[in-house]
Amino acid sequence: MEITLTESQIDLTLWLVEQHKAGLLPEEFTVAWEFSNHIPIKGKIVGMKGKHPEITYAALTALENVGLILTIHKEVIPAKKSGTQKIDGSEVFQYGWPRHVKSRTYTL
């Protein structure tokens, strides 16, 4: 299987591994996100001090898609608007970020 990542995604991966090996980043870490219209854009690792590389939601999603990190990518949330689906014909739901969620936990 060929893994295709951009240079910035490779740099982020190497930085995460280096920080973990140095004991500065636990295997499980949380990223606090900045949002634009309820869409996560960029974030910072909670509890890490010092300089961070740019951490974007797209970069972490790319790392997840190639199996380098894990997270719960989609959450089922209650919904009352268009574009929703029904569970067993009774409950209405959609996939996405609940509005109150501002961070997400990832695992190396």
Image: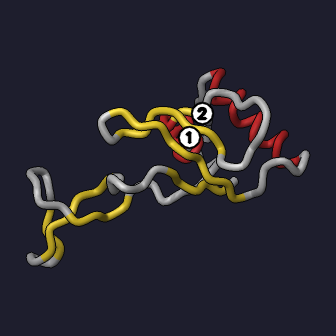
Vertical order, 18 against 101 (above or below): above
Asked where in the image residue 4 lies, by quadrant, the reply is top right
Query: Image quarter for residue 13?
Result: top right
Q: Are marks 2 and 1 in contact (CB under 8 Å)?
A: yes
Say what amino acid the circle numbered 1 marks. Leu
Total marks shown come to: 2
Horizontally, residue 71 falls left or right of residue 94, namely right
From the image, tell me which residue sits under label 1: 60
Q: Nearer the viewer, mark 2 or mark 1?
A: 2
Disc assigned to residue 24:
none
Q: Quadrant of the N terminus?
A: top right
For mark 1, give the secondary structure: helix
**Whole-percent x, y for residue 79 in the image:** 18, 61
Picture colour scheme: secondary structure
Q: Residue furthest top?
A: 7
Q: CA distance from mark 2 to mark 1?
A: 7 Å
Look at 9% across and 76% down and name the residue there.
89
Residue at 41% across, 37% down: 35
- Residue found 65% across the figure and 21% down from its top: 7
Label 2 crowd (10 A; few <14 / some 14-19 / many >=20): some
Q: Is residue 1 above or below residue 94?
A: above
The structure residue drawn at horizontal position 51% and vertical position 33%, both measured from the top left corner, is 42
10 Å neighbourhood of mark 1: few (<14), some, or many (≥20)?
some
Q: Earlier in the sequence, mark 2 or mark 1?
A: 2
Instruction: Tell me the amino acid under the disc marked 2.
Output: Ile
Q: Position of residue 104 (x, y in %)?
A: 52, 54
Which of the two residues, 14 or 5, is positioned nearer the viewer here? 14
Q: Tag 2, which secondary structure? A: strand
Q: Is residue 108 left or right of residue 2?
A: right
Disc 2: which residue: 55
